[in-house]
Image: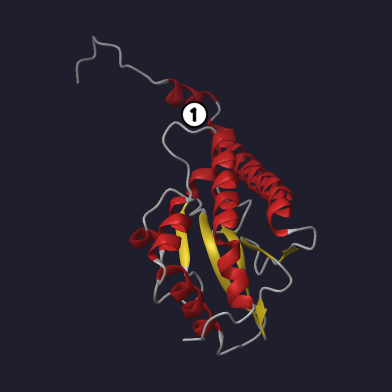
Amino acid sequence: MNHEVEPSISEATLLLIQHGGKVEDFIKAASKESGDVIHWMLGRLKARLVDVLGKDLEENPWSKDSFLFRKPAWRRDQVVFGFSYSAERTIGNHLLPAYSHIIGIRVQSDGNSKDQPRVARTIYEALSQDQERSLMVCAAIGRAPKEVLRATNTFWPLYTGAGLKPGDSWRQWADNVVEQVVALAVAATPVLDEVAAEGGPTV
């Protein structure tokens, strides 16, 4: 190496050198604040979904990283379904880009129900059999049906990733998630109403 040429040091390296003993503390604080961003986004999402699903909207977090928003009637025995956001990792333990950020239509069993796969399949069929409706619902989240409809998934008959795009700020990301889920809810609520009312055969 040429000792006569001073190395070029990036701003990131300078910060790490200058604050080397605090890097872990910085990451821990940033992870907690990333969790705060997610919970803030979820609060905004719930407020917006009330306008679509009604004041009786129910929120069913089934773990520390996944949340389901639904009408009370969206149930078949022990199986509930609705619109969902899932971080797929414990919220508050990671930086915002490290989460999977999945959104879509989720089916969840209150107990050990064998009906969950059948309900998921029924929703998939209701979404996929009518091509015009399928295109409309999937277009609400900017996707084609083949990209987001999941015939064999027993939890998510429809889902897509909603991670940070290159150059996005955390506010832009939160806005994008809220707008996508609300648009999906507007388009797909009639489908879930039909399923809840047993508007079609359970496959």
Q: As drawn, is 124 to the left or to the right of 37?
A: left
Nearest the viewer among 41 and 137 is 137
Q: Residue at x 36, y 55 (%)?
A: 144
- Report crowding for label 1: few under 14, some 14 to 19, many 20 or more residues within 10 A (C-alpha): few
Q: Point out residue 33 in the picture as x, y percentages from the top left corner.
A: 65, 41
Q: As drawn, is 14 to the left or to the right of 196?
A: left
Q: Residue at x 65, y 67 (%)?
A: 63
Q: Residue furthest bottom?
A: 114
Q: In this picture, is 184 found above or below 24? A: below
Check the image and tell me how it is coloured.
secondary structure
Q: Residue furthest top?
A: 4
Q: Point out residue 185 in the picture as x, y percentages from the top left corner.
A: 59, 56
Nearest the viewer among 175 and 189 is 189
Q: Residue at x 47, y 47 (%)?
A: 163
Nearest the viewer among 145 and 6 is 145
Q: Point out residue 194 in the picture as x, y percentages from the top left corner.
A: 59, 74
Q: Residue at x 59, y 34 (%)?
A: 171
Q: As drawn, is 153 to the left or to the right of 32?
A: left
Q: Count every numbered label the image shows and give the total.
A: 1
Task: State which quadrant residue 60 falls in.
Answer: bottom right
- Residue 108 visible: no
Mark 1: amino acid = Leu
Disc 1 target residue:
16
- Residue 60 visible: yes
**Which quadrant of the figure contains the N terminus?**
top left
Q: In this picture, is 98 found above or below 155? A: above
Q: Residue furthest left?
A: 1
Task: State which quadrant residue 86 falls in.
Answer: bottom right
Task: State which quadrant residue 151 falls in.
Answer: bottom left
SS label for mark 1:
helix
Nearest the viewer among 105 and 66 is 105
